[in-house]
Amino acid sequence: MTTPANEDAGEGFAAPVRIEAHAADNARVYMAGRDLHVTQEAAAAPAPVTALRTLPRDVAAFTGRQAEVKQLLAAAQPTRVVAIHTVDGMPGVGKTALVVHAARQLTTRFPDGQLFVRLHAHTPGQNPADPADALAALLISIGIDPRHIPDSMQARADLWRDRLTGRRMLLILDDAADHAQVEPLLPGAEGCLVMVTSRRRLPALDGATPLPLGTLQPEDAALLFTRLARRTPTPAEAGAVADIVRLCGYLPLAIALLAGRFAHHPHWNLAEYAQEFAATQDRLGELAAGDRAVAAAFEMSYRALPPQRQGLFRRLGLHPGPETDAYATAALAGIPLVQARSELEALYTDHLIDSPATGRYRLHDLLRAYARTLAERDTVEDRDAATGRLLDYYQHTAEAADRHLAEAPRHATPVAGPSPAAAPGLASHEQAMTWMRTERANLIACTHHATATARHSHAIYLTAILAAFLRQQGPWDEAISLHQTAAASARLTGDRLSQAGTLAELGWVRYLTGDFPAAADLLQQALELYRALGNLLGKANALRELGWVRYLTGDIRGAADLAQQALELYRALGNPLGEAYALRELGWVRYATGDYSAAADLAQQALNLSRALGNPLSEAYALTELGRVQYVTGDFPAAADLARQALELYRALGNRLSEAYSLWDLGRVQYVTGDFPAAADLTRQALDLFRTLSNRHGEANALQQLGQVQAVTEDHPAAADLLQKSLTLFQEVGDIQGEAEVLNSTGALLAASARPGEALSAYQRALHLARQVHSPLDEAHALEGTARCHARTRDLPAALADLRQAVGIYQRIGAAEASAAAEYLTQLQAEHPKEAAVQDSTD
């Protein structure tokens, strides 16, 4: 038995409702902690897990509310629009219990799912749920991976409504703040039913049918009490029952709490209890909307606890996060793990905490506030010590998890304090990822609490420990916020090493969002700090990451210099993982300059190091690079095989961003080998991932490739639109080489559309950009394109001159296009021998 999951859950239940763990809660936890780079999934990339039936349980003791239930059941009649019903009323009046009871009777009418989402308008210590976060919860519930959630609220709302098209779904939005919080969450599909509970009336919610909910009738309140208390009162006791429910204000929550006590104490005298209850002082007037009875109910339940359990209950009020487990509770209370488990179960039995999932515990909103009020009775020293132990526990355990998740070598965080007496064993990547996901909201809440209470060291180091997880899981806007706060704390305390690390992490997240200028600036700041501190590992990491940003913005020479410096430092430090990353980055530089042999050699070195270290992520990166070298040199079967190997590893690790690039790589192979439907399918999969991850650079690449596929299948208008969108994105993120690629594709499209003059202009722009960033492959593509345009306009000397340059570059770098371009040159020379002879004499 548990306490209700929210203030209204007590009405009508033999025991207050137990809310089971479900995807909506997990998503809310996820989004509160925002997300992103690597997650743990099955190697075979199983279908996304859905949680489409997440209603809290209903039991037989629901009492009264016949008219209200009838009204909600009638709302499920077939309709061509979304049916919206709002249930509003005071705290503890039973709003949630009512809608859950009705919803349980409607499950067969909504076969596509019944979802329950908490909006937390009145959760003490928490802000009302952001509609964007709630949308993420809903999307995850229907199978969208957390890392696929778009950043903007509108994009999430669009995706949510799109996925509900054609479905019959029931949605409960519990404890809404106002219509603005609810409006974005409403489905657009016909046949859906939405029930909204709120302490406020929501007249601005267009199309909603209001159902104001008052307190129980005295007779129903007394019946509810006797049912839950498992009592059959005598005629003499009937007056005492009436007094008790009256003192409860006929509020179901207060009635359930007191009745639960009587169920476990059959010897208690109803009349004596009623007298004592009447004399109890009001302690929760504010939290219970001025209702004395709820305060009395909480006070009486608390007073019935043994002293040690009372102390634990007070300590739970100090926890900054939404949930706890036995390990965190043991640290918070300073008690052994076995005792923590026993005490939590006892509080669960006494209806003072809820258990939403096995081993997880949550204070009801009002009880949390009450526990915090009680905690004020303890000394400041006792409260600070308890909170410090809790923060230490989370830092120690998160650091153990981070050792499995960190992608690159970095400094260990300072020891927080004495190691906790008990902590979960995190022996694998999977266990570490599971723990981090479960505790995400708690970790982020503790980080914010540490900042708010000037515990700057905890704020800084918890953020640092979360960095790799946030890179992989996101969302990146939450990661940015945390890193900015940590950087401010580091500056305030004069911790320059932590400031450098935080700036570097912030820079990398900016890169992931496509803000390359900000990324470069932040990484440069971090590099300067590391240099000033003489910190070689930090310097190497900053050099490598800054080099990657330089590479993407077309500064190939600068990228090569930075990657080489990083490689030398890693080798001097004896850091093979860093060495593997730097080798891979140098391979990219060689690839960009057309030195494919050197690129392959560097990637192979990185692959050998990664396999020797047993690091599958680094191995996948190296396989990706090797595959791209095989692609550009024309060994398409090998390129496809390497891309598939990398794809399997990325999926096993849950690295969705790299998975998207592997799908894009496979799409390129299918395109050049003529399987255009497969190319389109793979590229669209990649595009969907890039968009849901809000990775603009990847999206630009996928749009460009999809435009090429549309062009070759002669859907020229669609191709032109895709290529223009790609060009805009590349320009926005500052990828000049990407611009050159798109302009070459645009030139090919225009040429195929019998517009050689416009095509020539596009190719010439691409040629200028390719030479600016020293990209020989793009330069050769542009020259071949201009040659074909000149040939069509009968400017044969220019055509032969440009084509000869293109063939020379192709042959020098060993590009796959060399043979076909050479054949075209031979053909053109044979067809126009005089012009060819003149060109030969000119050369």
Image (cartoon, rainbow, N blue to C red):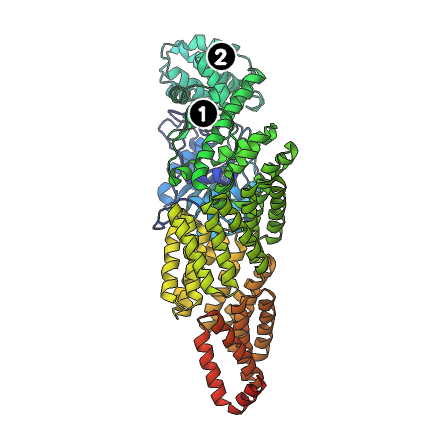
**Number of residues whose C-alpha sits closer than 10 Å to that of mark 2, classed few (under 14), some (14–19) or many (20 or more):** many
Disc 1 marks a residue whose amino acid type is Pro
Which disc, if any, is residue 420? 1
Asked whether 572 or 654 is in front, the reply is 572
- The quadrant where residue 763 appears: bottom right
Q: Quick one: 298 or 330, which is closer to the camera?
A: 330
Relative side of 243 to 532, left or right: left
Residue drawn at (46%, 64%) of the image: 596
Compute the Cα span from label 1 to label 2: 41 Å
Q: Is residue 820 above or below residue 571?
A: below
Q: Answer yes or no: is residue 203 visible.
A: no
Q: Residue furthest bottom?
A: 834
Q: Is residue 38 above or below residue 401?
A: below
Q: Which amino acid does the dot numbered 2 rest on?
A: Phe
Choose the circle earlier in sequence order: 1 or 2: 2
Image-based side of 588 in relation to 666, left or right = right
- Image coords of residue 689 (percent x, y): 46, 54
Q: Is residue 290 visible?
A: yes
Quadrant where the C terminus sits is: bottom right
Rendering coords of residue 708 (x, y %): 48, 68
Q: Residue 304: horizontal and vertical position, in percent? A: 44, 13
The circle drawn on residue 277 is 2
For image coordinates 58% across by 60% down, the residue present is 557
Helix, strand or loop at mark 1: loop
The residue at 48%/82% (across/down) is 825
Residue placed farthest to the front in the image? 572
Q: Position of residue 236 (x, y in %)?
A: 40, 9
